[in-house]
Image: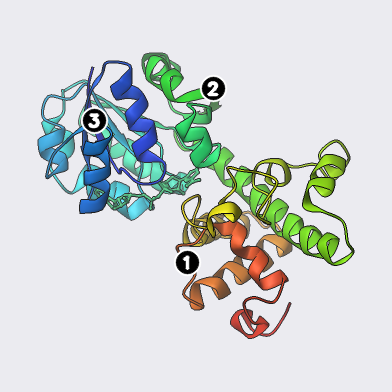
Amino acid sequence: MKICWIGLGNMGLPMAAHLHTAGHDVIGVDLSPDARDAAVAAGLRTADSAATAADGADAVITMLPKGAHVRAALLESGTLDAADADALVLDCSTISATEAREVGAAVAATGRRFLDAPVSGGTAGAQNAALTFMVGGASADLDAARPLLELMGARIFHAGETGAGQSAKMVNNMMLAMNMQSTCEAAVLAERLGITPQTVIDIAGVSTGDSWALRNYYPVAGPVASAPSNRDFTGGFSVALMRKDLGLALDAAAAHGVDTAATAEVARRLEGLIADGRGSLDFSSLIHLVDGTVPAASVGGAR
Ligand code: NAD
């Protein structure tokens, strides 16, 4: 297939590279010259504009930070019109369900097919083609997209109508954020009590404190080689993007009368890290507010 891939960041580049390796003709687009250079180094072709990359494409895939970027890339740049009249349009970014439905309706109005297909699994999942896809849209469209998704992921769930993939992703990330906050608090306390990080993982990982954050993303350097804590919290899933996801969750919760006190507290802490200039670090750097590296004043005094 000819595939236009828009967004070659921490997630997008390794995902696009799997499609390229499988023999698809992938043309990548990114606003950042560094991201385009990395794509070329990975063997991908790149184009200067999404409309150029989408010319005659069978599929257009977006992996962008926010809904506004998805809207700009797909709806405000001539991209859709350039793609094949029956093209599959997949948005793998995490955006709100409302935005997904709006973009989906705009795509459908051109006769093309849209699926929201956000992912879970982090950058390691993207690199190892082990992502979980949560898909919203028509079953027939998912069947058409499945061969592509299977090249990038290990599990594919049909969550429901357009937007349902985003709703599922949103509640997943609420839990991830809170699991990470609790893992950070436990990790720092355990260290101060003289328990090694590996011992915490060995015991809690098979006990009731278990979580993905504990086993795959431990916020103290050492035991989990692939965790961002081992590379000074660079790469991974940024504080700014997790703050965005919790904002989507808090908006949805407010609209549906759900008390999400813990989500609000973690969002406040992420906001503090952003205010301290740490928005591009991985979100497991929440530990810096727990261990005192970042002063409590950064999040309004509480710690
Ligand atoms: P990233 O910031 O590393 O990459 C985004 C890329 O999009 C950047 O290279 C940026 O230059 C590019 N971009 C922005 N606007 C553009 C436009 N209009 N046209 C072309 N390129 C544009 O982000 P990421 O970590 O790869 O995350 C992408 C999406 O995936 C986000 O919605 C995020 O919430 C979600 N996500 C991330 C992870 C993770 O672990 N990083 C996990 C699951 C889901």
Residue 43 disc label: 3
Task: Give the number of the mark in front: 2 or 3.
Answer: 3
Q: Which residue lies under the disc numbered 2? A: 154
* Pointer 2 or 3: first along the chain: 3
Q: Quadrant of the C terminus?
A: bottom right
SS for dot 2: strand
Task: Give the number of the mark in front: 3 or 1.
Answer: 3
SS for dot 3: loop
For residue 2, side relative to residue 188 (left or right): left
Q: Residue at x 50, y 72 (%)?
A: 274
Q: Amino acid at mark 1?
A: Gly
Residue 279 disc label: 1
Q: Residue at x 70, y 59 (%)?
A: 181
Q: Which of these two is toward me, 178 or 162? A: 178
Q: Is residue 180 above or below residue 148?
A: below
For residue 188, side relative to residue 67 (left or right): right
> Around disc 2, counting alpha carbons within 10 Å, would you say few (fewer than 14), some (14 to 19), or many (20 or more)?
some
Q: Quadrant of the N terminus?
A: top left
Residue 110 disc label: none
Q: Amino acid at mark 2?
A: Ala
Q: Is residue 248 visible?
A: yes
Q: Is residue 164 visible?
A: no
Q: Residue at x 67, y 58 (%)?
A: 257
